[in-house]
Image: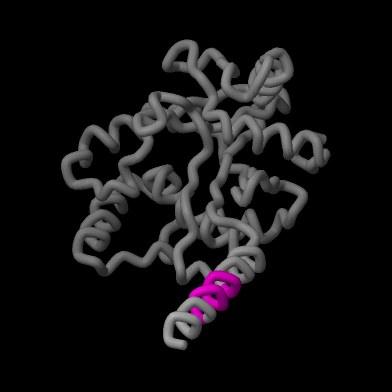
């Protein structure tokens, strides 16, 4: 009797968990910052991640319980952290880091987070794609050719104090969208896409390739 009761309870809990996961519809989200140069060329800002073997990808991660099952919030938070809040002024960053280390940090009060979230909300689904539960948002930011250099400088200055979630990317690079999609179209699969970046001939993270292909297939406004 007891064994039957506990088995039934386990089955019900498992079914509930699966239904919740299906309703949630996503497990992670991220942002791909992009800019338009004077000649209207679209370039993406991508990050190189050591934990992924030096592959480059977007800026994102898993959802938190307090994201309210909202991929826009997940993407804005995770993206801002991995970007190391590069849209916030250099003079403000030490204060942000101090707050984070004191467990008094509020992501909502940063310039980077608010730009990401407001742009995602404004764009709607025309600038986002989904692949296997990962939602990618394409977010326009002001073009600054020195942003990758400033990222390395900030990282070098504060690296010993950075929490892991702010320290996942080792470098970042501006890469023309057309170069990326040409490489994707010529590759035999998502595991063999390489592009030239400031770091040399670099592999794209396979799941990021799939996200790009999904966005192109769905004819997002971003690819128009």
Q: Residue at x 62, y 46 (%)?
A: 136
Q: Quadrant of residue 16?
A: bottom right
Q: Is residue 14 magenta?
A: yes
- Residue toward you, 27 or 163: 27
156 is within the stretch colored magenta: no
Q: Magenta region, mostly helix, strand or loop?
A: helix
Q: Nearer the viewer, residue 101 or 205?
A: 205
Q: Would residue 112 be seen by someone viewing this image from the given angle?
A: no
The image shows residue 194 at horizontal and vertical percentages of 56, 15
Residue 130 is situated, as x and y percent measured from the top left of the image, at: 68, 47
The segment highlighted magenta reads 9-16
Query: Quick check: 109 above or below 166?
Result: below
Q: Is residue 132 above or below residue 189?
A: below
* Left or right for 176, reference 53: right
| Figure check: 169 above or below 17 | above
Q: Quadrant of residue 23?
A: bottom right
């Amino acid at each position: 009797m007891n064994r039957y009761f506990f088995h039934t309870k386990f089955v019900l809990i498992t079914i509930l968990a699966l239904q919740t996961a299906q309703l949630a519809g996503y497990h992670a989200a991220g942002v791909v910052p992009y800019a338009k140069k004077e000649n209207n060329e679209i370039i993406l800002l991508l990050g190189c991640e050591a934990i992924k073997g030096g592959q480059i990808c977007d800026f994102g991660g898993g959802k938190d319980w307090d994201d309210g099952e909202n991929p826009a919030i997940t993407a804005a938070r995770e993206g801002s952290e991995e970007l190391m809040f590069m849209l916030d002024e250099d003079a403000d960053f030490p204060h942000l880091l101090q707050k984070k280390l004191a467990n008094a940090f509020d992501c909502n009060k940063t310039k980077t987070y608010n730009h990401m979230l407001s742009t995602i909300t404004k764009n709607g689904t025309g600038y986002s794609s989904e692949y296997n539960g990962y939602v990618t948002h394409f977010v326009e930011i002001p073009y600054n050719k020195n942003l990758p250099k400033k990222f390395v400088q900030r990282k070098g200055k504060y690296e010993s104090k950075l929490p892991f979630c702010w320290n996942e990317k080792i470098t970042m690079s501006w890469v023309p969208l057309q170069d990326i999609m040409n490489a994707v179209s010529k590759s035999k699969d998502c595991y063999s896409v390489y592009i030239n970046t400031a770091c040399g001939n670099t592999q794209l993270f396979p799941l990021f390739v799939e996200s790009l292909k999904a966005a192109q297939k769905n004819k997002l406004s971003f690819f128009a």
